[in-house]
């Protein structure tokens, strides 16, 4: 049981006699008589005025006045557990969240100018929740823009001018009651995030103005308050001059996105700011806390450091007099903070003032979470606590399919839990500071954070004359970086500062870099546009190709570690070649990882639901997920500029369901690796890729898989392997009992005991190792064709020139091949058709283009393969009486692709099986483009939708995204094999097939076997339904029309899906299907119940 610390006054060095002795005489009104600057209402389009009467930003903390944590009851003093209090428990906290009166206008010149007046009649106004985005509540439409400003195409971009037309304005009003015990206190209004600005009024009086929509704005509202009821009113514009710096790649929404509240504090003596800088000394063994506290007034500071068990670890004192107190606290061998073992201490800061009698009077107490860790760049490597950690990261936008920018704590914890499940250990707060609670969660659960400032001016591009280089933007760029550092300084999870995103590098950023360095020497600073030069400590490019990474790693003159700020653009069916990146990262020390773009698809629910309605998407089938109506850019109107589905790039879906490429991310990011050392002896090596923890809480569960079936299993409970070490273990399987032709060893690394957000038994890493590989003679299909055991069955061949079809019949089997097309027109077994009505088996070289295919223009470059002309040259028939087979061969001239195609149907009457061979003979000197696939499409009856297969599964996989899927026997159906990407595209393919059974519910159907591993999928959609054509359409998976067939795709080869980017990158060379000779042979074997 955790020991709870109840703070006593003697512990803080305070005098009990002073508690509650006198009541403050000053009223709320009389505290401040400072002349307040008044607004001109030009602020919203003035780059040089970004705030009026706004308090300087400070680190995230909440101060508890003395009577919050001590009180008198029945003549006794009662103390609360201050270390575990929440600010909502304070007597001096008043939430402003909830329902407000609300007025919305479409254009800025229509806004009510008297919105703040006390006598205004707002009875006809609507209501709006705070926090809440207007567009998610029926006021305006969500707008998505990636490249270009939100007013793109509708406004002449001449900064600092901001549009009036379409510049929506929201006005808010609410009556609140100020608690009586706040009389005599300073009252501060806190607005966590308001887009794009805020004009604040209290009781008809102007209280302040602020921009920078992703950090808190605080104002002293004491002079305007009165006892009892008070009117709080504010107005915010959709766009202001700050919007030139908020051109991020996300939904453009407006309103209040984070919590808002009032708090009260001692007006004459209070903690204004506190910064805690941890350090490790003596070879990273001992800890140091450098504490800088800024105090209003004169008081004594007491610092007490507590561990997780609320035990006192260290103390210090200091005196602050209208300024800053600097304190150093030394701790011998503290528990260290890192993402693997995140240990937090609590620093209790008490502030007290001296009385005339020499005693001390408590003013306040402030708890601050701290972690001991050291971040540095040494020898061209990024180090945490002296270790060259690997950044297995993701970029994360703050987005919810119902709340927009408004995320609940439940949603944030869900995101952390998924990150842990996917082995993601780092997050970049793209491209702005996040809700302070997010950093607290990263502190608590262990996620490295690249904390990014709210700065992006992508629309200005990167030329020498780009506006962002000009002096007019110097103040905004500087202030936004100051805000970011000032708020999030104390979080141990923050290991790097990022100055922003996709804004041209210049002196404005160089000055910001120098300012950050002057404030914080304990962390590196990164900026992508600084490249490898001055203004960044880390080379953090985006979408750096695999080949460029290796070139950088091999160059001895490369100046700094390479950690990509964005890579592996997971848009739609993507995420290919991640393994190629990580093979290099694990090979070259100067390469240390990157941040996937991005964590979550930004799709919004077409019909806004109650937040977190869909809590367990992992329990839903793909068909159930397909029916969820997600919207992307351009879905809401035809007027606003849009970059369409370019905001659907997530590792996971909007409701936090795993996209197929999530499994590859989890696999490539895993921290435990197994390799086969000696298969005969069962000797396996286990490498612990962690840098700070051993494998003491993991067990190795193993199973032996023979021809897809588990035959042996066991567990090695103790696998003590130290961090960054490798150790061999013997798996006690018995090879003498093995009868299978192909044998694999599956290994799962499971948690023995639950850890935060991770349950006992959870698989954190896995492997599949070959024990016995199946040997192939190269003639398997021929051998299968000849293996017609049992009684010889006589076949009847009808081959008459006047007949439309060439027909082969047996008592069980009928096969018809059309003379005009050379394709099968009928295929029945025991009176039931193996083809859907009007269906056939035909060559197939095309897939519905993926987002990456469209980005590279492959839908046009490969178009010759979409429906290539196939001129039938002839159909030949050969009957082999000795083998009792009939061979029908169709030959085609394919002039557009300069080759010849031959399809053979070898019918085996004894078994009813049919061997199908497709061979393409390419012209030697022809220059023809690549193809997506080389295979065949079989159109089956709709209800022949049950699949069982032996290959990689159960999730779709492709040649450049297959490591995460293990070879085994799996079952599925045609509805579930199509994964519902938000925009329809190629989906469902799985590789390394040994065999594939396709049947109806009764078990009638057929088996597909091939000599070589092949690709296959069975879905209820035609390729044409998933294919947009030459250009993308505004289409969605939820409104797809199903085929009358179950479409079975069989491929000898299938192109990779690529992943370096989604606007030009092809699959890597080794994953492409180049023009040339190709062949595919498989056998269809009828199955009956």
Image: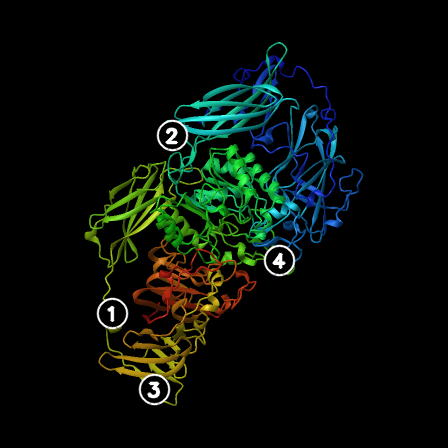
Circle 1 sits on which residue?
779
Rendered location of residue 205, percent (x, y): 75, 35
Rendered location of residue 333, percent (x, y): 39, 26
Q: Residue furthest bottom?
A: 802
Circle 2 sits on which residue?
284
Query: Considering depth in this image, is 737 or 276 the residue closer to the camera?
Result: 276
SS under mark 4: loop
SS under mark 1: loop
Regarding residue 569, the answer to whether it shows in the image is: yes
Query: Considering depth in this image, is 103 or 826 the residue closer to the camera?
Result: 103
3 and 1 marks in contact (CB < 8 Å): no
3 and 2 marks in contact (CB < 8 Å): no
Q: Which numbered disc covers residue 641?
A: 4
Q: Quadrant of the N terminus?
A: top left
SS under mark 2: loop
Circle 3 sits on which residue?
799
Q: Residue furthest left?
A: 736
**Which image quadrant is residue 797 in?**
bottom left
Question: What residue is drawn where x is 35% and y is 58%?
Answer: 952
């Amino acid at each position: 049981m955790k020991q709870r610390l109840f703070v006593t006054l003697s512990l803080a060095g305070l005098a009990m006699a002073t508690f509650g002795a006198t009541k403050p005489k000053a009223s709320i009104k009389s505290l401040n008589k400072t002349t307040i600057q008044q607004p001109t209402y030009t602020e919203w389009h003035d780059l040089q005025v970004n705030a009026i009467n706004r308090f300087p930003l400070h680190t995230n903390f909440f101060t508890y006045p003395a009577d919050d944590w001590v009180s008198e009851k029945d003549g006794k003093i009662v103390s609360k557990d201050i270390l575990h209090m929440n600010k909502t428990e304070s007597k001096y906290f008043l939430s402003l969240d909830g329902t407000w009166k609300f007025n919305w206008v479409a254009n800025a010149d229509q806004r009510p100018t008297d919105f703040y007046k006390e006598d205004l009649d707002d009875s006809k106004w609507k209501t709006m929740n705070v926090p809440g985005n207007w567009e998610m509540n029926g006021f305006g439409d969500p707008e998505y823009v990636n490249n270009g400003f939100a007013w793109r195409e509708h406004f002449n971009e001449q900064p600092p001018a901001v549009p009036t037309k379409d510049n929506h304005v929201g006005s808010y009003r609410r009556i609140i009651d100020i608690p009586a015990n706040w009389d005599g206190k300073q009252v501060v209004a806190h607005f966590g995030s308001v887009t794009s600005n805020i004009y604040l009024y209290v009781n008809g009086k102007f209280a302040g103005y602020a921009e920078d929509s992703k950090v808190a704005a605080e104002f002293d509202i004491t002079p305007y308050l009165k006892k009892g009821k008070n009117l709080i009113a504010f107005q915010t514009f959709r766009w202001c001059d700050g919007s030139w710096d908020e051109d991020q790649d996300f939904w453009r929404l407006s309103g209040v996105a984070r919590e808002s509240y009032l708090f009260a504090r001692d007006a004459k003596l209070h903690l204004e700011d506190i910064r805690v800088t941890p350090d490790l000394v003596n070879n990273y063994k001992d800890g140091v806390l450098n504490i800088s506290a800024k105090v209003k007034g004169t008081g004594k500071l007491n610092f007490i450091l507590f561990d997780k068990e609320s035990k006192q670890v260290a103390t210090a004192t200091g005196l602050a007099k209208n300024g800053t107190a600097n304190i150093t606290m030394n701790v011998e061998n503290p528990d260290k903070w890192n993402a693997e073992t995140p240990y937090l201490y609590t620093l209790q800061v008490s502030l007290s003032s001296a009385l005339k009698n020499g005693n001390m009077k408590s003013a306040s107490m402030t708890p601050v979470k701290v972690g001991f860790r050291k971040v540095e760049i040494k020898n061209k490597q990024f180090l945490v606590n002296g270790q060259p950690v690997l950044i297995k990261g993701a970029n994360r936008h703050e987005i919810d399919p119902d709340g927009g920018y408004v995320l609940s704590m439940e949603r944030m914890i869900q995101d952390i839990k998924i990150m842990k499940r996917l082995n993601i250990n780092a997050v970049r707060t793209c491209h702005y500071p996040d809700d302070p609670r997010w950093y607290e969660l990263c502190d608590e659960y262990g996620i490295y954070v690249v904390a990014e400032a709210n700065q992006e001016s992508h629309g200005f591009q990167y030329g020498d004359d780009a506006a962002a280089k000009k002096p007019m933007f110097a103040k905004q760029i500087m202030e936004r970086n100051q805000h970011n550092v000032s708020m999030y300084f104390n979080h141990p999870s923050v290991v790097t500062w990022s100055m922003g995103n996709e804004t041209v590098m210049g002196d404005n950023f160089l000055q910001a870099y120098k300012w950050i360095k002057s404030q914080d020497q304990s962390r590196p600073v990164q900026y992508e546009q600084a490249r490898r030069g001055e203004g960044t400590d880390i080379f953090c490019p985006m979408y750096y190709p695999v080949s460029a990474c290796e070139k950088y790693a091999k160059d001895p003159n490369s100046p700094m570690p390479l950690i990509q700020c964005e890579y592996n653009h997971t848009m739609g069916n993507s995420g290919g070649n991640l393994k190629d990146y990580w093979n290099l990262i694990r090979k070259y020390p100067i390469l240390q990882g990157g941040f996937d773009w991005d964590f979550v698809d930004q799709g919004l629910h077409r019909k806004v639901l109650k937040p977190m309605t869909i809590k367990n998407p992992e329990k839903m089938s793909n068909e159930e997920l397909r029916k969820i109506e997600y919207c992307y850019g351009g879905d809401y109107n035809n007027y606003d500029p849009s970059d369409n589905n370019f905001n659907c790039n997530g590792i996971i879906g909007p409701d936090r369901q795993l996209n197929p490429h999530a499994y590859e991310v989890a696999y490539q990011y895993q921290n435990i690796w197994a390799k086969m050392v000696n298969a005969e002896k069962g000797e396996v090596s286990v490498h612990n890729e962690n840098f700070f923890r051993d494998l003491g809480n993991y067990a190795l569960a193993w199973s032996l898989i023979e021809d897809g079936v588990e035959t042996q299993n066991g567990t090695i409970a103790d696998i003590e392997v130290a961090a960054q070490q490798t150790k061999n273990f013997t798996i006690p399987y018995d090879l003498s009992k093995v009868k299978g032709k192909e044998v694999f060893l599956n290994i799962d690394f499971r948690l023995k005991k639950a850890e935060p957000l991770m349950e006992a038994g959870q698989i954190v890493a896995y492997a599949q190792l070959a024990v016995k590989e199946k040997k192939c003679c190269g003639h398997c299909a021929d051998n299968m064709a000849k293996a017609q055991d049992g009684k010889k069955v006589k076949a009847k061949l009808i081959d008459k020139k006047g007949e439309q079809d060439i027909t082969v019949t047996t008592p069980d089997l009928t096969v018809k091949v059309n003379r005009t097309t050379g394709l099968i027109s009928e295929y029945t077994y025991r009176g039931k058709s193996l083809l859907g009505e009007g269906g056939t088996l035909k060559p197939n070289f095309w897939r519905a283009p993926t987002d990456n295919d469209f980005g590279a223009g492959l839908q046009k470059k490969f178009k010759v393969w979409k429906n290539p002309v196939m001129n039938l040259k002839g159909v030949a028939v050969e009957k082999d009486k000795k083998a009792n087979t009939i061979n029908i061969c169709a030959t085609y001239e394919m002039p557009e692709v300069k080759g010849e195609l031959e399809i053979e149907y070898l019918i085996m009457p004894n078994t009813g099986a049919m061997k199908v061979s497709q061979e393409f003979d390419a012209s030697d000197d022809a220059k023809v483009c690549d193809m997506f696939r080389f295979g065949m499409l079989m159109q089956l009856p709709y209800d022949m939708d049950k699949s069982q297969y032996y290959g990689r599964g159960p999730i779709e996989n492709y040649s450049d995204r297959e490591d995460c899927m293990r070879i085994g026997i799996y079952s599925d159906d045609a509805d579930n094999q199509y994964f519902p990407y938000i925009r329809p595209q190629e989906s469902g393919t799985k590789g390394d097939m040994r065999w594939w059974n396709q049947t109806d519910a009764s078990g009638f159907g057929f088996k597909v076997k091939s000599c070589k591993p092949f690709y296959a999928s069975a879905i209820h959609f035609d390729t044409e339904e998933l294919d947009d054509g030459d250009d993308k359409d505004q289409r969605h998976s939820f409104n797809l029309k199903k085929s009358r067939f179950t479409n079975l795709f069989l491929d000898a080869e299938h192109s990779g899906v690529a992943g370096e980017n989604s606007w030009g990158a092809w699959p890597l060379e080794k994953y492409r299907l180049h023009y040339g000779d190709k062949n595919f042979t498989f056998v269809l074997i009828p199955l009956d119940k």
